[in-house]
Amino acid sequence: QVQLVESGGGSVQAGGSLRLSCVASGDIDSRYYRGWFRQAPGKEREGVAAIDTHTARTFYADSVKGRFTISQDNAAHTLYLQMNSLKPEDTGMYYCAAEGYGRWNEQKTYDYWGQGTQVTVSS
Protein backbone atom coordinates (compact mmCIF):
# COMPACT_ATOMS: atom_id res chain seq x y z
CA GLN A 1 0.00 0.00 0.00
CA VAL A 2 1.39 3.36 -1.05
CA GLN A 3 1.14 6.31 1.30
CA LEU A 4 2.06 9.92 0.61
CA VAL A 5 2.52 12.41 3.44
CA GLU A 6 2.94 16.12 2.73
CA SER A 7 4.46 18.71 5.02
CA GLY A 8 5.86 22.21 4.92
CA GLY A 9 2.74 24.27 4.43
CA GLY A 10 2.05 27.38 6.45
CA SER A 11 1.16 31.05 6.37
CA VAL A 12 3.46 33.57 4.74
CA GLN A 13 3.27 37.08 3.41
CA ALA A 14 3.36 37.82 -0.28
CA GLY A 15 6.88 37.56 -1.60
CA GLY A 16 7.82 34.89 0.90
CA SER A 17 8.90 31.31 0.36
CA LEU A 18 7.89 27.84 1.45
CA ARG A 19 9.23 24.39 0.75
CA LEU A 20 6.79 21.52 0.61
CA SER A 21 7.86 17.92 1.08
CA CYS A 22 6.09 14.68 0.24
CA VAL A 23 7.43 11.45 1.66
CA ALA A 24 6.35 8.25 -0.02
CA SER A 25 6.15 4.84 1.57
CA GLY A 26 5.23 1.57 -0.01
CA ASP A 27 5.95 0.17 -3.42
CA ILE A 28 5.83 3.15 -5.77
CA ASP A 29 6.64 2.57 -9.40
CA SER A 30 9.45 4.96 -10.24
CA ARG A 31 8.73 5.02 -13.94
CA TYR A 32 5.89 7.50 -13.79
CA TYR A 33 5.13 11.09 -12.91
CA ARG A 34 5.01 12.49 -9.42
CA GLY A 35 3.36 15.84 -9.05
CA TRP A 36 1.90 18.63 -7.00
CA PHE A 37 -1.64 19.91 -7.30
CA ARG A 38 -3.45 22.63 -5.43
CA GLN A 39 -7.03 23.52 -4.70
CA ALA A 40 -8.27 26.92 -3.65
CA PRO A 41 -11.65 27.31 -1.93
CA GLY A 42 -14.45 27.08 -4.45
CA LYS A 43 -12.13 26.11 -7.28
CA GLU A 44 -11.15 22.91 -9.00
CA ARG A 45 -7.93 21.14 -8.17
CA GLU A 46 -5.22 22.17 -10.62
CA GLY A 47 -1.83 20.82 -11.54
CA VAL A 48 1.07 22.93 -10.33
CA ALA A 49 4.17 20.94 -11.22
CA ALA A 50 5.29 17.43 -12.00
CA ILE A 51 8.44 15.45 -12.57
CA ASP A 52 9.10 12.41 -14.69
CA THR A 53 10.78 10.28 -12.06
CA HIS A 54 12.76 8.36 -14.67
CA THR A 55 14.13 11.22 -16.79
CA ALA A 56 13.81 14.03 -14.21
CA ARG A 57 12.08 16.18 -16.80
CA THR A 58 9.92 18.78 -15.09
CA PHE A 59 6.61 20.41 -15.97
CA TYR A 60 5.01 23.57 -14.58
CA ALA A 61 1.77 25.44 -14.78
CA ASP A 62 2.24 28.81 -16.47
CA SER A 63 1.16 30.57 -13.29
CA VAL A 64 4.13 29.24 -11.31
CA LYS A 65 6.91 29.09 -13.90
CA GLY A 66 10.02 30.86 -12.69
CA ARG A 67 8.80 30.87 -9.08
CA PHE A 68 8.31 27.20 -8.16
CA THR A 69 10.77 24.34 -8.50
CA ILE A 70 9.93 20.67 -8.23
CA SER A 71 12.64 18.20 -7.31
CA GLN A 72 13.05 14.70 -5.95
CA ASP A 73 15.33 12.74 -3.70
CA ASN A 74 14.88 9.18 -4.81
CA ALA A 75 16.99 7.76 -2.01
CA ALA A 76 14.73 9.41 0.54
CA HIS A 77 11.56 8.73 -1.47
CA THR A 78 10.77 12.40 -1.16
CA LEU A 79 9.30 14.94 -3.55
CA TYR A 80 9.80 18.65 -2.98
CA LEU A 81 8.20 21.86 -4.14
CA GLN A 82 10.21 25.00 -3.53
CA MET A 83 7.89 27.97 -3.77
CA ASN A 84 9.38 31.46 -4.02
CA SER A 85 7.85 34.89 -4.60
CA LEU A 86 4.54 33.63 -3.30
CA LYS A 87 1.38 35.49 -4.20
CA PRO A 88 -2.04 35.54 -2.54
CA GLU A 89 -3.41 33.58 -5.50
CA ASP A 90 -1.09 30.72 -4.56
CA THR A 91 -3.22 30.11 -1.48
CA GLY A 92 -4.79 26.68 -1.28
CA MET A 93 -4.44 23.09 -0.19
CA TYR A 94 -1.45 21.49 -1.86
CA TYR A 95 -1.55 17.78 -2.67
CA CYS A 96 1.18 15.39 -3.63
CA ALA A 97 0.37 12.75 -6.25
CA ALA A 98 2.22 9.67 -7.47
CA GLU A 99 2.23 7.09 -10.21
CA GLY A 100 0.95 9.35 -12.91
CA TYR A 101 0.76 8.03 -16.46
CA GLY A 102 -0.76 10.39 -18.99
CA ARG A 103 -1.10 14.14 -18.98
CA TRP A 104 0.89 15.46 -16.05
CA ASN A 105 -1.67 18.09 -15.06
CA GLU A 106 -4.77 15.89 -15.01
CA GLN A 107 -5.96 14.37 -11.73
CA LYS A 108 -7.03 11.12 -13.39
CA THR A 109 -3.43 10.54 -14.40
CA TYR A 110 -2.40 9.71 -10.83
CA ASP A 111 -3.12 6.63 -8.74
CA TYR A 112 -2.08 7.86 -5.31
CA TRP A 113 -2.70 11.08 -3.39
CA GLY A 114 -1.67 12.59 -0.10
CA GLN A 115 -3.96 14.33 2.38
CA GLY A 116 -2.69 17.79 1.57
CA THR A 117 -0.91 20.63 3.30
CA GLN A 118 -2.36 24.14 3.55
CA VAL A 119 -0.57 27.15 2.10
CA THR A 120 -1.88 30.61 2.90
CA VAL A 121 -0.33 33.73 1.39
CA SER A 122 -1.43 37.10 2.72
CA SER A 123 -1.06 40.39 0.92
Image (cartoon, rainbow, N blue to C red):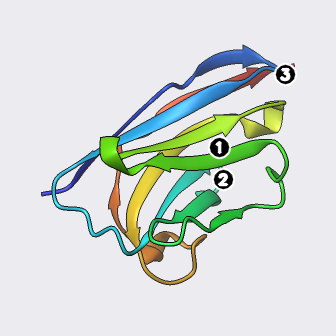
Q: Is residue 74 above or below residue 11?
A: below
CA gap between label 1 and label 3 equals: 16 Å
Q: The N terminus lies in which quarter of the figure?
A: bottom left
Q: Nearer the viewer, residue 115 or 31?
A: 31
Q: Callout 3: helix, strand or loop?
A: loop
Q: Position of residue 81 (x, y in %)?
A: 59, 41
Badge 3 crowding class, 10 Å Cα cut-off, few under 14, some 14 to 19, many 20 or more, is some
Q: Residue at x 51, y 58 (%)?
A: 35
Q: Amino acid at mark 3?
A: Ala
Q: Callout 1: helix, strand or loop?
A: loop
* Residue, disc 3: 14
Q: Position of residue 40 (x, y in %)?
A: 65, 43
Which quadrant of the structure image shows residue 5?
top left
In the visual, does 43 lie left or right of 104? right
Q: Are marks 2 and 1 in contact (CB under 8 Å)?
A: yes
* Residue, disc 2: 43
CA gap between label 3 and label 2 equals: 21 Å
Badge 1 crowding class, 10 Å Cα cut-off, few under 14, some 14 to 19, many 20 or more, is some
Q: Residue at x 45, y 76 (%)?
A: 109
Label whose residue precedes the other's in the sequence (1 or 3): 3
Q: Position of residue 116 (x, y in %)?
A: 43, 39
Q: Residue at x 75, y 61 (%)?
A: 61
Return the residue found at the far bottom: 102
Depth check, mark 1 against mark 3: the one in front is 3
Q: The C terminus lies in which quarter of the figure?
A: top right
Q: Is residue 33 above or below residue 68?
A: below
Numbered circle sitting on residue 40 = 1
Label whose residue precedes the other's in the sequence (3 or 2): 3
Depth check, mark 3 against mark 2: the one in front is 3
In the visual, does 52 lie left or right of 87? left
Q: Callout 2: helix, strand or loop?
A: loop
Q: Amino acid at mark 2?
A: Lys
